[in-house]
Image (tube, rainbow, N blue to C red):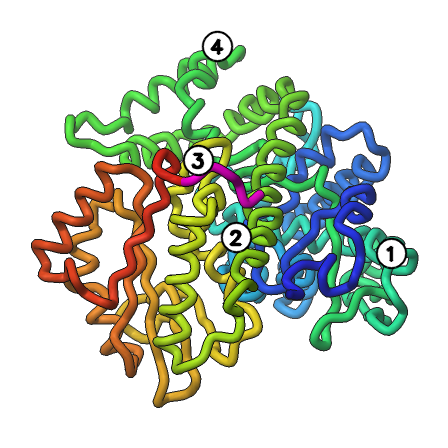
Amino acid sequence: MDIYFSDYYDVQAQDLDSYGAFDVSLVNDLPLFVDPFLLFNSDNPTYLALHDQIIKYMCFLKQVSLDQQIPDALKSAWFTFPEVSQNWFGYCERGNKGHGLGWNFANSLHRNFRTVFSDFGEETVSRGSHIEKLTLIRDGVGRDNLSDFTTNLIQGFLAEYTQAFARENIQQSLLGEFALRKAHFNYQTRTWSTGRYVLPAYQGDFVLLTPKDILTKDETWINRSDLLHRFMGIADALPNDELRAQVNQYLMQVLPTDPKATQDDVNSAIVAVIERYPEVIDYYVREREDHGDQAASFAQSRVAAAERLFVEQVKALVAQLLVPQGFYRVAGDTYDEAMQRLLFLKDVVENKGGHVFFYQDGEPIRRETDLHILYRLTWFATPSDISREVNDGRGPADFKASRGAPDKTLVEFKLAKSSKLEQNLAKQTTVYEAASDATHPSIKAIFCFTESEQARVHTILERLGMLDSPHVVLIDARKNNKPSGSMA
């Protein structure tokens, strides 16, 4: 089955690995992205040059933000970017089409350069400038924006990197010549120039490869969650006595005193301090720089785990599902197809060693988003349209399998440990069914990873009168009651 780059273009996975590229899925985005700190902290002169290129463009944006009132046409050309969907990375759980960087991003970036990041490119505390600073306060720029922005600014390099591999390893009939509209920025004319590249062709578009050693998963090395987590220690360790006193005094004023205050309340207070004293960010960034030798190994371990989970183990699962009955040739309507796929998965997980598919480093995956991606990767070669997070007015369903208006089935994934499991089983799916005009009963798949979780689900189903429901599939993913052997 042609799920991955190596499958579709008939190249050896080992050749991709030797080249240093990630074997991306051409069915669904994988939750990885470029970490600009890995460019900054690298010994590779090409990566260092890429980081300099990013900072140079950021400084250009800062300068025009301070020097002039920018017409909308120029703001669009300089500050907005489409998503580079062709690298098949990101947070989209259906296909690879995201939103890109539009006017909200442009206006936030423009405003931040005139206020809290007015020293960008002229920092005196940190050893360098970092694009990640834009994500450290809550003003419209998040980690997904950072990923899209970084990839846009280095897509010329990614195209050259992919072209070199493609010309050497992929047959000519699978390649095409494509134009990248924002390949390089000309500072003399202040315009983007178009580059033309010979790249792997896919469904009228192209595919970009990305080196694994500039990728990470979940969080960049410099990130907002880490800043908030470390803030108290950073505030106490500020070397500037006056700044330290001001920061701590203001922090005491805004910290909630209500014993029922949540961590979100505390984080909001910390953000207020950062917005008032943004120079604290530079001390946090310097601390991250000082420990930068750990960044590469940290990212490498996360990318390797993602590779095992989303590539190696999916390939093993697909091999199991292809035989002996032909998983990808199931008959019937969308309900039959969705149910048979789940029952096949249940059998593989419970009886054929497939439970390892749902573990990383011996620990169970207890994130529904990861389960959704894994499930979506098995929906290939199907006559049905499979959509993720369908929002038909009353909330999103996990999956909808559709063959037109007369044949629609919803599939909901639940974790047994969820505190809202009973509430969702009782009410949520019924609302989704009505909103989406589903023509079949919805299917509920519940994953259990421990005996106590399984007992809890049994009690909830019994209380709801759903214990014997044919529409509920309980998948026992425990690892202590399975036959020996491994799929991977």
What residue is shown at x 21% (from left), y 71% (from top)? 431
Residue type at the position of mark 2 = Ser
Q: From the viewer's perspective, is the residue at label 4 or at label 2 nearer?
A: 2
In terms of sequence position, does the residue under pointer 4 or pointer 3 come before the other? Answer: 4
* Image spot of residue 99 (x, y percent): 54, 64
Magenta residues, as a range?
A: 483-488
Quote the CA–CA distance across marks 4 and 3.
Answer: 19 Å
In terms of sequence position, does the residue under pointer 4 or pointer 2 come before the other? Answer: 2
Marks 4,3: beta carbons within 8 A: no
In terms of sequence position, does the residue under pointer 3 or pointer 1 come before the other? Answer: 1
Quote the CA–CA distance across marks 2 and 1.
Answer: 26 Å
Quarter of image, res 128: top right
Quote the CA–CA distance across marks 4 and 2.
Answer: 32 Å
The residue labelled by disc 1 is 188
Marks 2,1: beta carbons within 8 A: no
The N terminus: image quadrant: bottom right
What residue is shown at x 35% (from left), y 80% (from top)? 408
The residue labelled by disc 2 is 108
